[in-house]
Image: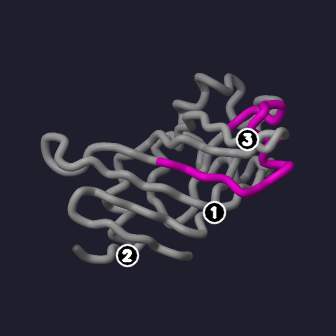
Amino acid sequence: MSELTLHDLSKKMAKLDFAMLTTTTSSGNLTSRPMSNNGDVEYDGDSYFFAYEQSKKIAEIRADSAVGLTYTGAVGMLGGSPLFVGVEGSATLITDKATFKDHWTKDLDRYFPEGIDTPGVVMIRVTAKTIRYWDGTDEGQISL
């Protein structure tokens, strides 16, 4: 068993698109929902997602920026060992259209029909503080 660097873990995560984003509700409970990073998978400790500003998750992030992300997927040839990644971090809401362009893909047009000009679109940046991982061979923690 060896400790992975963030770069090594990023390579293993390269094909993982979906994460469960966990926020805290107004009643103090945890809630999770699937989010796609739309192929923006060059992981450096920051994850990016788009949402509508009026959604519950955005209100929850405004009230408490502490969030969690969980990723899972197959690693290696023919599936291989599963990869589990848990991220503890903080969310920042971004409304700058120039920044949107850096993370926008054509697939997002399905959900946001006017592209980056869709009214009410906001980007969520989750900045990792602690990352825990397990893939059957390696397990550990990376603190950022």
The label nearer to you, 2 versus 3, is: 3
Q: Residues within 10 Å of mark 3 (few under 14, many from 20)?
A: few
Q: Do the residues labelled 2 and 1 touch (CB within 8 Å)?
A: no
Q: Do the residues labelled 2 and 3 touch (CB within 8 Å)?
A: no
Mark 2 secondary-structure assignment:
loop
Segment colored magenta: 51-70
Residue 120 located left or right of residue 129: right
Please name the residue that numbered disc 1 is placed on: 127
Q: Which of marks 2 and 3 is nearer the N terminus?
A: 2
Out of 98 and 93, give the one closest to the viewer. Answer: 93
Q: Which amino acid does label 2 sit on?
A: Thr
Query: In the rendered image, which quarter contains the C terminus?
Result: bottom right
Examine the image and state in which quarter residue 31 appears: top right
Q: Earlier in the sequence, mark 2 or mark 1?
A: 2
Please name the residue that numbered disc 3 is placed on: 29
Q: What residue type is labelled 1?
A: Thr
